[in-house]
Image (tube, rainbow, N blue to C red):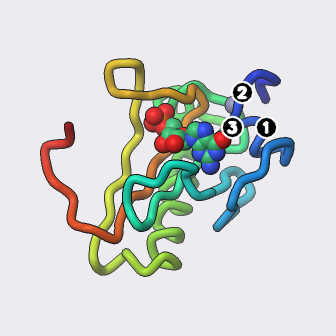
Amino acid sequence: MSDPDCLFCKIVAGDIAADIVAESDTAIAFRDVNPQAPTHVLVIPREHYQNVGEVAAAGDVDAGDLFRLCSEVAATEGIAESGYRLVANTGAQAHQTVFHAHVHVLGGRPMGWPPG
Ligand code: 5GP
Ligand code: ZN
């Protein structure tokens, strides 16, 4: 399933360019256009779902695939040992701005807690 008006569906389709760093059968990983850390990669399912909760509820994409690709990205980016943060903003109050499920992989600098 794909949404013709969705920015990330267009990246999956190759209609909008992105710096893709890893791929699996069900997900792709590409660099965020506005990086918030030395490593800032977005991991998204190829199929269109509004958020990671919808991915999990739908059941036809293994949500574990998203996390495996996040882990692979962390390893290839060299941040697996130093540490990294996975973020899935869900809904307006959590600052979700693109409504195609995605997990941010952030690392390469110390990060504070709690998040803003
Ligand atoms: P959200 O705020 O929904 O959690 O994250 C959406 C992310 O998508 C933002 O960090 C934003 O910088 C990134 N983004 C928005 N448009 C594009 C784009 O066209 N290409 C890429 N690579 N990232 C984008
Ligand atoms: Zn989409």
The residue positioned 84% from the left and 48% from the top of the image is 14
The circle drawn on residue 8 is 3
Looking at the image, is 75 positioned above or below residue 46? below
Report the disc number at residue 39.
Answer: none
Q: Which residue is drawn at 43% across and 57% down?
A: 105
Q: Distance between the residues labelled 3 and 1?
A: 5 Å
Q: Position of residue 29 (x, y in %)?
A: 62, 57
Provide residue 100's location: percent of width, then percent of height: 60, 31
Distance CA(mark 2)–CA(mark 1)? 6 Å
Q: Is residue 70 left or right of residue 81?
A: right
- Reply above or below: 30 against 71: above
Task: Report which residue position mark 2 lands on.
Answer: 6
Look at label 2 and name its amino acid: Cys
Check disc 1 and report the residue beneath it: 10
Residue found farthest to the front: 34
Along the line of sight, which residue is nearer the eye, 2 or 25?
2
Q: Which residue is drawn at 79% across and 37% down?
A: 10
Image marks 2 and 1: residues in contact by CB distance under 8 Å? yes
Determine the secondary structure under disc 2.
loop
Which amino acid type is shown beneath numbered disc 3? Answer: Phe
Q: Position of residue 11 (x, y in %)?
A: 75, 44
In three-dimensional space, the C-alpha distance between marks 2 and 3, rounded to whole angstroms, equals: 6 Å
Dot 1: element: helix
